[in-house]
Image (tube, grey):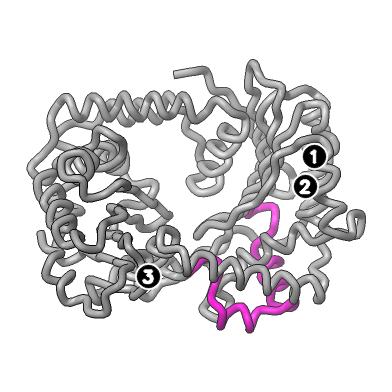
Amino acid sequence: MPSFNFQKKVLANGLRVIMVPVRGTEAITLLALFGVGSRYENIKLNGAAHFIEHMMFKGTQKRPTTMDISRPLDRIGADYNAFTAKDHTGYWITTVGKHFPLVSDVLFDMLLHSKFEATEVERERQVILEEIKMYQENPLMHIDDLFDSLIFAGHPLGWNIAGTKETMAGIGQKELLNFKNDFYNPRNAVVVVAGKLNKKVFSRINQGAQKFSGAGGKKQPLVFKFTKTKPVILHHQKVDQAQLALGFPAYHFKHKSLPALRLLNIILGGNMSSRLFIEVRERRGLAYFVRSEIDSFSDIGSWKVRAGLDVSRIEEAVRVIMGELAKIRLGVTEKELKDAKEFIRGKTVLSLEESAAQAEWCAKQELLMGKIFTPKEKMAEMDKVTLKDVKMVANELIKKEKLRCAVIGPWKDNNKFIKSVKL
């Protein structure tokens, strides 16, 4: 694995600042990550974390309009954006090293001094409503939300990150500012700068980061408890290609068996030589797109299979997928396990070529886990996984009573799918 160095400093206000020098690059990335996402909301505030992310680009006292924020960054060719997840929210800018003073000034200005004007709140509400429609009307995007609503039923993890039409109507300027003040404090944030570093970068970061204020620390979200619910949900939509997501509750991100699950996931459906890809696509031609995925949070996770399927052959495809899940409980081969380890090793090296990737690697681990593991340490965990470990994980997670399945297709009766989804 390549060398990976970082320096961590905790400021007097509690803000964690991490510096990651990256050799052989002219780029530099500034990333601010906050420990808040949709799982921290109540039902009336569903969508608030995402709404706040949008409002951060709508103007400050120093830069009154959106254009005053975007134009200087576009002028230097910077990449910049923000994102809201279920358990964190991030803001980042990547630029050429010489432009770091401008970039840091813009980002800290947004985070500390965004105005949240009432007129902008109302305007952005309409933008978010269109975003919600975009996801709901795109089966490839909407299937994930449907699956989460099943696997995390009765919990905020099962809610749409962007909220709903109904919750958007009830969130105004006051609600947004109150929510922001609850979570956007220095003890609930991590700032990372990665890339071509020098002493001036350290000075600029300290100058901006020390201005963060706010009482309190990281608030604890509602702990997830698995509840019995219907095993299958069918969303009726007129399409020629059905979207399928089926899977099980899985491990939280500190679980000792997560490395074994990651390897099992690669073998099942993580690449073009995986069991699902070969059996579903290459041998039977049942799908163009089929894969398996893991999501992990502080107290729970999910493991699912995703596929886009011909509506006339979906029952056959479901039977094949369920058959592969049953087979993998019997174990995997030594070669499959070795290949999966090398696959993750190679992907890890390639994924960390850019400064933005190294910034995200450090920020997420520090914020969510409280400790940063180097790529070498992560791979050492993988290398310890045995065939016995992988088989144990498969049998622990693949259980009929916890299987959940979401389908988007042109049917109105889901009885046929309930019969098809069997282990």
Q: Inspect the image, locate mark 1, and give the three-letter code of the amino acid beneath it.
A: Val
Q: Quadrant of residue 132?
A: bottom right
Q: Inspect the image, locate mark 3, and give the three-letter code of the amino acid beneath it.
A: Ser
Q: Camera-side residue: 126 or 207? A: 126
Give the magenta range: 160-188
Mark seen at residue 76: none
Q: Does 231 sit left or right of 409 as displayed?
A: left
According to the image, label 2 marks what residue?
107
Q: Camera-side residue: 26 or 417? A: 417
Earlier sequence position, callout 3 versus callout 1: 1
| 94 w.r.t. 306: above or below | above
Instruction: Please report the residue visible at 13 percent of the width from the left and 35 percent of the height from the top.
Output: 332
**Residue 288 drawn at (x, y percent):** 30, 46
Instruction: Please report the residue visible at 38 percent of the width from the left and 52 percent of the height from the top.
Output: 295
Question: Distance between the Cα atoms at labels 3 and 1?
Answer: 38 Å
**Marks 2 and 1 in Cβ contact (< 8 Å):** yes
Q: Does 210 sit left or right of 255 as displayed?
A: right
Looking at the rendered structure, the secondary structure element under dot 1 is: helix
Residue 179 part of the magenta segment:
yes
Looking at the rendered structure, the secondary structure element under dot 3 is: helix
Residue 253 part of the magenta segment:
no
Q: Inspect the image, locate mark 2, and give the three-letter code of the amino acid beneath it.
A: Leu
**Residue 122 drawn at (x, y percent):** 74, 76
According to the image, label 3 marks what residue?
149
Question: Distance between the Cα atoms at labels 3 and 2?
Answer: 34 Å
